[in-house]
Amino acid sequence: MKSATLHGPNSVEVSERERPEPSSDELLVEINACGVCTTDLHMYSGGLTVDYPMTPGHESAGEVVAVGSDVGGYEAGDRVAINPSIPCYECPACKSGRENLCTDLTSLGGAATHIIEGAFAEYVTVPAGNVEDIGDLDYSTAAFAEPLGCCINGVDQVDLTSGETVVVIGAGAIGLLLTQLLETSGAGTVVVSEPVDERREMALEAGADHVVDPIEDDVATTIPDSAGDVDVAIEAVGLPDTIEQAHELTGPGGRTLVFGVPPEDATIEISPFDVFYEQRELLGTYSLTPDTFARAVTLLQNGRIDTETLITDEFGIEGLEQAFEQMEARDGLKKMVYPNQ
């Protein structure tokens, strides 16, 4: 089978290797769609510490082609979305329902303590407990279950109350998913800050009430003028400056969520007195849980989230390097790879 392997920073090679066989508790899935994530880009560029060689890819869906001897409930031909996060289910975090914080987390092609072969390949093996049936949902839509599950996990962290005002910094694919999810989750006013004209237009179409160009406008005054007090600010870029900007936008009792993946050595400045006196929170969100993954599949199946407009570029597996190059140039939005085409 073909797989795309990273051999070092800025080095990806598509090659043939033996098709894996599922163990007794696993499924063998033919990958029919796999989204390209910023995490994949960081692995490709050397921005995240990983052991090379490795096969990335963790936003995937496909068809079951073989079933382990101890697996019940699935058979060849079933159409599934894959949750790439494999927790131990034994540590305190797992037992408390925070499987994303598992101390021994394994990820299929994503960022975790242990990384196994990912989904930029024609086939992968996956534990039977890490898939959700998708029925007749398009594979390219089902591949959004993982990033949408991460978005749901993030919104859960800020404990959103109906009617609250939320600012999203960044209108890439994740920012636009968050914008749709916030509307579905009951946010009163959603404001999106994004420097790219086309992305601001897409944010409005996705449900944003106001959009702001941070290059042309003073975000610190424009957003409060248009939307009033900010209850929640979500940073979906991953840069220290925009994290600080998001935090400064919130008022007393406000919550700032760091969703974008910042550099590992990045630091920011905050006022501890403001955190104390105004009860302002700075929160993180990492990955997803089995619960948020299942909820994401349900939202996608019921048409609550539009993904079709987010896919701007499609590739066979040989086009993965081109997808990375486009992402580095901020060209387009979601890149979708079809390993079996």
Image (cartoon, rainbow, N blue to C red):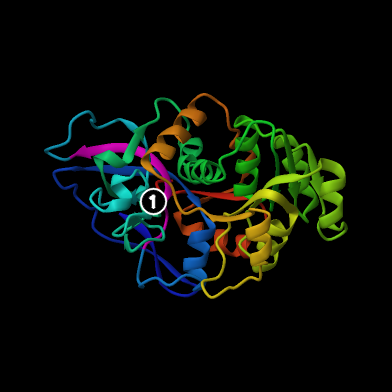
- Determine if the magenta segment contains residue 170: no
Q: Who's the residue at 51% across and 29% down the image? A: 299
Of residue 330 and residue 12, the one placed in the foreground of this image is 330
* Residue sitting at the far front: 277
Q: Is residue 242 visible?
A: yes
Q: Which residue is mark 1?
A: 100
Q: How many marks?
A: 1
Q: Position of residue 102 (x, y in %)?
A: 33, 55
Q: Position of residue 103 (x, y in %)?
A: 31, 59
Compared with residue 282, is residue 99 higher up or lower down, i.e. above or below? above
Q: Does residue 133 appear left or right of residue 167 in this picture? A: left
Local secondary structure at mark 1: helix
Of residue 203 and residue 102, the one placed in the foreground of this image is 102
- Where on the picture, by quarter, is residue 97? top left
Compared with residue 174, is residue 72 higher up or lower down, i.e. above or below? above
Q: Does residue 190 appear left or right of residue 174 in this picture? A: right
Q: Amino acid at mark 1?
A: Asn
Quadrant housing the N terminus: bottom left
Q: Residues within 10 Å of mark 1 (few under 14, many from 20)?
A: many
- Where on the picture, by quarter, is residue 309? top right
In terms of secondary structure, what is the magenta stretch mainly?
Answer: strand
Q: Who's the residue at 68% across and 67% down the image? A: 271
Of residue 306 and residue 103, the one placed in the foreground of this image is 103
- Determine if the magenta segment contains residue 60: yes
Q: Who's the residue at 39% across and 25% down the image? A: 135
Q: Is residue 84 visible?
A: no
Q: Who's the residue at 54% across and 59% down the image? A: 38
Q: Position of residue 190 (x, y in %)?
A: 72, 39
The residue stretch that appears in magenta: 55-67
Q: Position of residue 238 (x, y in %)?
A: 61, 62
- Where on the picture, by quarter, is residue 112? bottom left
